[in-house]
Image: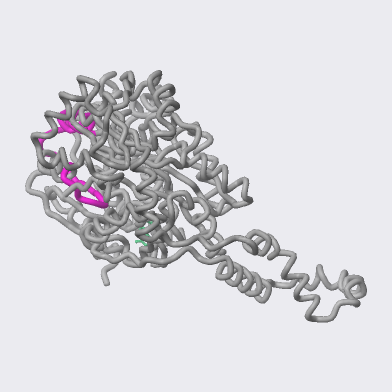
Amino acid sequence: MKTFADLGVESKIINGIEELGFSKPMPVQEAVIPHLLAINPRDLITLAQTGTGKTAAFGIPLIQNSKGKPKFVKHLILSPTRELCLQIADDLRDFSKFKDEVKITAVFGGSSIDKQILNLKNGAHIVVATPGRLVDLQNRGKIDLSKIETVVLDEADEMLNMGFREELDEIIKNTPKERTTLLFSATMPNEVLEISKRYLKNPEEITIGGRNVGAENVSHEVVLVHARDRYLALKRIVDFHPEIYGIVFCRTRNETQDIAEKLIKDSYNADSLHGDLSQAQRNAVMNKFRIKHLKLLVATDVAARGLDVDDLTHVINYNLPDELEIYTHRSGRTGRAGKFGSSIVISNLREKNKISDIEKQLGKKFKFTEVPSGKEICTKQLFHLIDRMEKVTVDHTQIDSFLPEITKKLEWLDREELIKKFVSLEFNRFLDYYKNLPDLGKPDKKDRSKRREQFDGDMTRFFINLGKKDNLKPTDIIGIIKDNLSFKEIGIGDIDIKETFSFFEIESDYQEELLKNVNTKNFRSRKISLEVASKRKNDRQSSGSRNRNPRNENRFSKRKKSGKDSESQFKPAKRKLRRKK
Ligand code: AMP
């Protein structure tokens, strides 16, 4: 086993990282540190999840390579979010604690640009930046990238997911051709491969923990439920794990808020984290979660990105994400630092195909489990309570003086009665809740066809004037639907995103409300235009209104030319998981 000194790390930095408790290098550090400390290092692609120690892997050599007065920015680290940016800068300052000549500056959106400009003016060896803010600074002529030696693209897949592709192009083109570029990513979808080809020269490739493989210590479980029972299933899963400390991932801000509010109302120690919160509110929630004042954080994928928590017991997927890579990111948030974690998916039968796609990508099988029954939950909670009681430390100096009076008061109770009463005190909440509740049944194929009959009888297909050109994703459509309806748990059918327009289906009962609310809204500053394309009845061929609108007629006759498209048009309510290869 190598030491940091064996990797060539200088003693001042070793002193800094030892104070943080880093006694030996992690695998990604063993691979990256000597590589980057070499003279003229080659470009490098590293496939590594967060939690593998990658910040120190690139941070330590960059610090060691930062010498003298900082006349120019020498090393640039790009990261997707403000939180991650701050975290990296903080980590780097910790590593360089005993090497105080190293100047590190973080620049990111949502914070005063003037202060950041001043910091840059005062000189920095290393700049940690979010792409948007860096382009802004570039445009104002406040940062000079012409002497950059190293560019680190951290969480490259996330940066692309967040739509920073143009900003990355803009930044990279202003850096010298002779730079060393390092790309870190948890997954390697096509978009990342494509930028790696353009930004990196003849890169070496390192994979930590296997390509696209979820963390080793994570179990992947699916709980199959009816869509309408999702929330009840979530509560049961949480109740079945009394020590849970986890993130519940939702797809939209509204859903996140909605689920968190329900959990809080039902007395769970939960809160929400999403983009509608101010930065101060987000910080407050993240802090409460970090120090475990909250045991459940209901979050959107984007908002949860900046959160660095190593000891989550569970990740709960309230809905499956539309992109495979996002599942890898979500599940990789648990099972870190040698601990074991579970990633649980609450799913309905219609999503089974997505599950097998994820299994293929992960190279791991999901365990299909059922929602715990009321009896199972009560048993688990009861024994948890008894365990806690057995382990509790009794403070004799405080308690003993009250004991004679307490003993006298409880004299009339025998031992058995006494135990029952103490246990009930804590436990009645669960007993009361579960005693008359039926178990949540697993949906079977019969249920599915019954439900589909309902859906098929009353699904409306909409045309929307947004498509791939607008960078529209299925999650955006779901967001538009949910943001504009008072009732959220509605049936959503096929979503079909074309180049300049798209189709989607929802239960017809909500047609009017959706039309009324959406047609006044914008999507990324483009006015949304929504119209009914067709209504789908039980007999799928009898979609009478489908071709009445001449625009639709054209559209469909064009679609029919392609066998694939015309087939997908008549497909029952089922959305495909977008898979990046
Ligand atoms: P990262 O992947 O950079 O987010 O790091 C994940 C966690 O591992 C952070 O909490 C680091 O402080 C910690 N860490 C990084 N390197 C080491 C090391 N060599 N020994 C122990 N902990 C480490």
Q: Identify which residue, 218 or 290, lies in the foreground.
A: 218
Above or below — where is 180 with respect to 314?
above
* Viewer-nearest residue: 463 or 67: 463
Q: Quadrant of residue 466?
A: top left
| Residue appearing at x 14%, y 45% in the figure | 193
Would you place residue 223 above or below residue 117 in this image?
below
The image's colouring method is one colour
Residue 390 point in image, percent of width and height: 67, 76
Q: Is residue 114 visible?
A: yes
Identify whether 101 is placed above or below 420: above
In the displayed structure image, the side of residue 467 where residue 12 appears, left or right: right
Query: Is-magenta flag for residue 177?
Result: yes
Q: Camera-side residue: 544 or 51? A: 544
Placement of the N terminus among the 4 image quadrants: bottom left
Rendered location of residue 456, percent (x, y): 33, 42
Q: Residue at x 16, y 49 (%)?
A: 581
What residue span does the magenta drawing correspond to? Answer: 165-191
* Ligand 1 image position (quadrant): bottom left
